[in-house]
Image (cartoon, coloured by chain):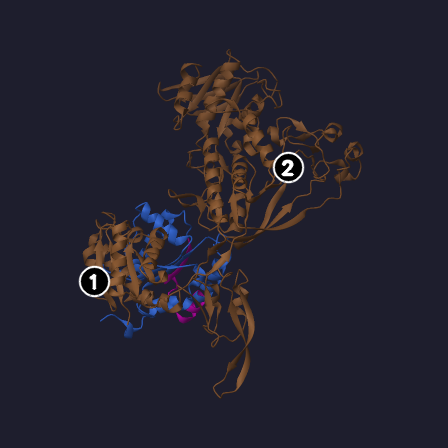
Chain colours: A brown, B blue
């Protein structure tokens, strides 16, 4: 006979305000098998948990139902409490009467009725719960970091510091990411390269870190502690082990008209190239789309001048397979292309640039050697207009609904740097709001306004029109003065929204992690687990999770590293015991389950069975490897004989819930 | 058909643990209302839902059953929701064959980020089932509440 305890939580007033918790406890107390039914203000608190523990001991309970918040929140809390009182933790069920009842219903009577039904369903289920024991599986002591920007580099350095092997996979020929393209950083105005490149070198020199540049993740299999990842090393047609990075090939390459991605296409590079002087690894890469030898089979200049003999035109993509215990995603962001905004004339006026393009134009290693010149005629601009929120905080299809967070600050930085270097240049900034939360951020913005006399104007730019004389007419409204403005500008800079990298979506599918509607990775809990994904063993670092500036990215990168280290420190992890199992007496060995199993957890064995007539027969039956099974339950439905069932979510348990709800 | 204003349908919702159940939680966190007729059963994956469970619900007196899972391609278990989609397609054709309104059963993809969608889907489904009226064809009268 079952002895079930029901515990109804008030959650302060979160539940108690719309659900009559006393009535729920009273009603559930009359259910079959329930021996104690109590309510308490905060069941998850120390004293609430003690209430549960004492009841388990006192009434010798065989099952516990907690009517409280979502099981995603506190299922583990109550399972641990039960375990400490000597009850198998899998004999605890949660009825979600907060997120799925009190918070969404306003009428007390109907919310109370629903809470009772949800409680009854949980009681019906717990009647059929079986004690489960979690197995253990070993942890591979190696981490994979996907993305080699500042987030990936910081995470890798921290994990390596703790003594674990780390691999960085970077899709570009060099690590460094977006930060390598930036000139100065706010709010300190220190040089980005000066603080980034030592980190890049540190990562390259660290014995524990392996950098796979110009590589992509091709496939991910396995689960927490034991991922098998296939990395595709794209052919760069240069032997990484031989290339010394001398750069002679890049000087001699005759194909000099390739748009330079690193400088946002503002100048050209050669077909064989090293993205920038401080690239790590400093190895040349041949662009097969432009290389004359690879395209036409005629040239070979680079291989002739290379003294190291590193050029290899026959190189092909290589696949590497490696096992990892933890994976950190650091795929970062990209600014959107403002092509869709015809009003800003970006697609046809070269003097309308994005902020990242301006960053390159002002960079000492950029196309103009650090002198700010108009891209069209290489003259010095005297009036520059900055447009904020291009594509950010936008409710139409063209843009993004969120605030890109970093634009207000980098625009203040740009404005300040321009006014500092070229005091004869007038700078206008059109904004919706100036958002400067952050240490020393508002002081920085005020310096731009007060000390550097940057003209901040609240209002949006309506139309940007290039004129025949090379100037640009910027038509805008000043909302505070309530007037229309025309500014005769030399350059227009668009603070474009940032979006997750395009590789993030297919990667999320491979990793079976969740993304939000904007393709940012979703964290396991928005407040309490901000650097973990909901998929165990996958951690999030940097702007792949949401727009972030550099200090926030570094902070999150170290946090993700700490979480990954926590996992890698363990020799084994407890597995989910809610896995499938097969009833061998019912199984007829048809292979239906094996075909639907995404993990290959089901194998077949020949087993000897005693038949009713006492003879023995050998039959082929399915067996599930509990360490590999992840408990999706696909096989349970595929099984025609009903031999497959899922621990914790058995056929009879779900049917019991259905019955309780429909009664 | 005449709509009975007082008809309160019983709706069983199966939600996968990773997307739709989290989406339901999110609609709660955001205080987005939907009718209390909807009662959610948590399953690890939408592919855990045997079409038999759906028929069982109708037999026991449910007026509508809705099954929610991750969007195609986003399944936590890689491929579970594809199985669900096929199975529900088959179930629909069986319901059609038996002459039972297929609109009482619905399959929806709701991600963990789509709290608003979850509430909207539930509001719509309850409204649609109300228009269909009580489930009489599949209900087993022996199971009816006294």
Task: In the rendered view, tell whether residue A582 sits above or below residue A511.
Answer: below
Tell me if residue A557 is in the magenta stretch.
Answer: no
> Which of the two residues, A647 or A296, is positioned nearer the viewer here?
A647
Callout 2: few (<14), some (14-19), or many (20+) C-alpha neighbours within 10 Å? many
- Marks 1/2: CA–CA distance: 66 Å
Q: Is residue A46 left or right of residue A155?
A: left
Do the residues indicated by labels 1 and 2 lie within the same chain of the protein?
Answer: yes
Q: Which residues are magenta?
A: B92-109
Label 1, residues with CA under 10 Å away: few <14, some 14-19, many ≥20 = some
Task: Look at the image and tell me in which quarter the N terminus of chain A lies.
Answer: bottom left
Q: Quadrant of residue A286?
A: top right
- As helix, strand or loop, the secondary structure at mark 1 comes to helix
Q: Which mark is residue A27?
A: 1
In the image, which disc is placed on residue B2? none
In this view, the residue in front, B61 or A453, is A453
Report which residue position mark 2 lands on.
A173
- The percent coordinates of residue A419 (x first, y second) are 49, 15
Please identify the residue farthest to the bottom as the structure is shown: A613
Residue A199: image location, x then y, percent:
56, 32
In screen coordinates, is A469 left or right of B7? right
């Amino acid at each position: 006979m079952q002895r079930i305890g029901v515990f109804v939580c008030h959650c302060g007033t979160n539940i108690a305000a719309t659900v009559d918790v006393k009535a729920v406890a009273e009603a559930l107390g009359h259910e079959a098998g329930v021996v104690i039914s109590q309510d308490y203000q905060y069941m998850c608190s120390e004293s609430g948990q003690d209430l549960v523990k004492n009841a388990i001991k006192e009434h010798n309970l065989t099952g516990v139902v907690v009517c409280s918040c979502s099981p995603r929140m506190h299922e583990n809390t109550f399972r641990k409490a039960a375990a400490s009182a000597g009850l198998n933790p899998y004999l605890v069920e949660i009825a979600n009467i907060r997120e799925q009842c009190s918070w969404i219903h306003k009428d007390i009577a109907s919310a109370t009725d629903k809470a009772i039904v949800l409680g009854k369903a949980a009681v019906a289920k717990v009647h059929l719960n079986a004690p489960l024991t979690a197995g253990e599986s070993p942890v591979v002591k190696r981490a994979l970091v996907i993305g080699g920007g500042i987030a990936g580099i910081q995470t890798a350095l921290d994990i390596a510091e703790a003594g674990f092997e780390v691999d960085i996979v970077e899709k570009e020929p060099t690590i460094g990411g977006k930060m390598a393209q930036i000139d100065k950083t706010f709010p300190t105005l220190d040089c980005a390269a000066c603080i980034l490149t030592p980190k890049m070198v540190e990562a390259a020199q660290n014995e524990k870190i392996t950098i796979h540049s110009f590589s992509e993740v091709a496939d991910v299999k396995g689960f927490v502690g034991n991922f098998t990842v296939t990395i595709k090393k794209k052919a760069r047609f240069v032997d990484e082990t031989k290339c010394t990075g001398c750069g002679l090939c890049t000087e001699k390459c005759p194909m000099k008209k390739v748009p330079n991605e690193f400088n946002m296409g503002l100048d050209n590079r050669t077909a064989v190239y090293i993205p920038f002087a401080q690239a790590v690894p400093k190895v040349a890469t041949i662009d097969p789309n432009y290389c004359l030898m690879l395209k036409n089979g005629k040239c070979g200049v680079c291989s002739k001048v290379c003294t190291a003999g590193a050029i290899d035109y026959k190189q092909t993509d290589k696949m590497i397979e490696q096992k990892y215990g933890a994976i950190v995603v650091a795929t970062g962001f990209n600014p959107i292309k403002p092509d869709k905004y015809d009003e800003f004339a970006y697609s046809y006026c070269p003097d309308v640039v994005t902020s990242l393009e301006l960053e390159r134009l002002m960079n000492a290693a950029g196309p103009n050697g650090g002198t700010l010149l108009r891209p069209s005629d290489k003259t010095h601009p005297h009036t520059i207009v900055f447009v904020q929120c291009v594509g950010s905080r936008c409710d139409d299809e063209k843009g993004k609904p969120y605030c890109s967070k970093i634009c207000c600050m980098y625009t203040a930085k740009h404005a300040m740097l321009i006014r500092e270097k070229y005091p004869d240049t007038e700078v206008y900034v059109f904004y919706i709001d100036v958002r400067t939360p952050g240490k020393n951020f508002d002081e920085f913005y005020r310096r731009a306004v007060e000390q550097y006399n940057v003209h901040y104007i609240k209002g949006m730019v309506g139309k940007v029109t290039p004129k025949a004389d090379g100037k640009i007419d910027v038509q805008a409204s000043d909302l505070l003065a309530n007037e229309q403005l025309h500014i005769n500008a030399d350059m227009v800079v668009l603070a474009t929204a940032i979006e997750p990298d395009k590789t993030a979506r297919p990667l999320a599918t491979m990793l079976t992690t969740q993304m939000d509607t904007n393709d940012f990775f979703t964290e396991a809990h928005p407040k309490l687990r901000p650097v973990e994904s909901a998929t165990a063993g996958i951690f999030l670092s940097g702007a792949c999770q949401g727009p972030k500036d550099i200090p926030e990215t570094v902070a999150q990168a170290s946090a993700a590293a700490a979480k990954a280290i926590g996992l890698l420190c363990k020799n084994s992890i407890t597995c989910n015991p809610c896995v499938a199992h097969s009833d061998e007496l019912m199984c007829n060995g048809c292979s239906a389950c094996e075909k639907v199993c995404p993990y290959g957890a089901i194998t077949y064995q020949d087993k000897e069975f005693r038949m009713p007539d006492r003879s023995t027969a050998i039959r082929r039956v399915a067996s599930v490897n509990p360490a590999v099974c992840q408990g999706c339950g696909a096989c349970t439905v595929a099984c025609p004989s009903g031999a497959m069932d899922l621990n914790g979510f058995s056929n009879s348990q779900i049917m019991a819930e259905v019955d309780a709800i429909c009664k | 058909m005449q709509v009975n204003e007082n008809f309160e349908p019983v709706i069983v919702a199966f939600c996968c643990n990773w997307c739709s159940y989290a989406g339901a939680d999110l609609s709660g966190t955001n205080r987005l209302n939907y009718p209390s007729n909807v009662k959610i059963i948590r399953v690890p994956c939408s592919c855990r839902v045997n079409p038999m469970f759906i028929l069982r619900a109708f037999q026991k007196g449910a007026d509508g059953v809705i099954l929610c899972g991750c969007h195609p391609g986003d399944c936590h278990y890689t491929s579970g929701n594809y199985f669900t989609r096929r199975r529900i397609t088959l179930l629909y054709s069986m319901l059609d064959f038996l002459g039972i309104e297929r609109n009482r059963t619905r399959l929806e993809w709701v991600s963990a980020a789509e709290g608003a969608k979850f509430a909207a889907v539930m509001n719509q489904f309850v409204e649609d089932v109300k228009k269909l009226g009580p489930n009489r064809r599949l209900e087993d009268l022996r199971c009816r509440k006294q």
